[in-house]
Image: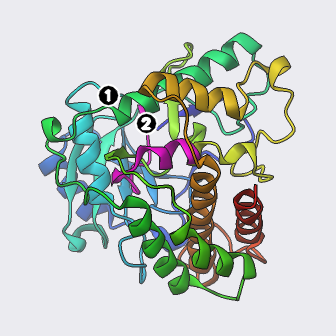
Amino acid sequence: MTTTTDPGAPSIGAVRSNQQLDQPALEAWFRAHVDNPAEPLQLQQFQRGASNPTYLLSAGTRRWVLRKKPPGTLLASAHQVDREFRVMQALGGIGFPVPRVRAYCDDASVIGTAFYVMDFLEGRIFRDARLPGMAPAERAAIYDDLNATLARLHQVDVAAIGLADYGRPGNYFQRQIDRWIKQYRGAETETIPAMERLMAELPGRIPPGDETAIAHGDYRLENVMFHPTEPRVIAVLDWELSTLGHPLADIAYGCILYHSDSESWGTLKGLDFRAAGIPDEDAYVAAYCRRTGRASIPGFNVYLAFSMFRLASIGQGVFKRNLVGIGNAPASRDNSHTHHLASTACAILDR
């Protein structure tokens, strides 16, 4: 779906042995529902990502992207590629930056699980949140458009684009806490005291008040594609976790990188923000508030702790899938990322 400015990032390669597709069946479906190119389809697989397997389809000089549910037994409400397809189709209709989706298939007899196809886009995805090798002004412009695009998403009229039933309005944080406790318990491999504390305390710590908007669920620099040469968002990607939810969950989630030590997930911890041209956390949140008409965000530390708990639960699910051999990456020796996020979230709750 992208070119990348990080030459060390895994890119596109051969399809993994445990994620092969029935190519004749796929090609027959593709020609009936997407396009009928003169050349046969060629399949490769994107090497990054640990959730929904993603493939590059090519025929001559033309390219598309296929995303599917992974094989195996899955946690309830996870890997909902049908929701990705639906929200991108609706947002694309009003000119919001998303890839053009082509067709969705829920017939498991084709390639084993549900999937959809969208257009391939040429652009830049930044794997390193510090944006090495760039001028400070360009870094500032990139983060500014990242922020502006999120604010724009949260102001979309969901009823006007047919998404009024895309999720249950109201009580978002409590429902999400319940959901991610259930998901975490389903993937639990050991007792993590910090996770136990978060599951016990978060339900009673969420600030009062409620709002409803399209919540992306995984909005961060790595899930946004920029124009090949301009600091302008051309596509927001990875909508698997999107729903109707509280918009402050997205802005808090995007601020995890100010507290994370994870080089693989993304970190801005310890950065000289003034020299880099990248906004610090207070400035980034203030820009979002300005764009969405807020004076401030009371209780932001609780929203941030919730976001870390949620990401820790997701990470535990990835770790468990890798352990049983159905993940997109080799099994790691431990789930230290889950431990780190949970302990950091507890420290933020105590601020």
Towards the viewer: 334 or 327: 334
Mark linked to residue 96: 1
Q: Which residue is mark 2?
A: 236
Q: Residue at x 43, y 79 (%)?
A: 75
Give the residues in magenta. 235-252
Q: Quadrant of residue 60?
A: top left
The amino acid pointed to by label 2 is: Val
Is there any visible trace of residue 40 in the rendered image? no
Q: Where is residue 224? Give x, y as percent.
A: 51, 35
Rendered position, 55 above or below 254 = below
Q: Residue at x 87, y 38 (%)?
A: 270
Q: Are marks 2 and 1 in contact (CB under 8 Å)?
A: yes
Q: Quadrant of residue 72?
A: bottom left
**Marked residue nearer the N-terminal end (2 or 1):** 1
Mark linked to residue 180: none
- Local packing at callout 1 (Cα closer than 10 Å; few below 14, some 14-19, many 20+) is some
Rendered position, 170 above or below 183 = above
Q: Where is residue 232? Give x, y as percent.
A: 50, 18
All told, the count of numbered labels is 2
Q: Where is residue 124? Give x, y as percent.
A: 56, 28
Q: CA distance from mark 2 to mark 1?
A: 9 Å
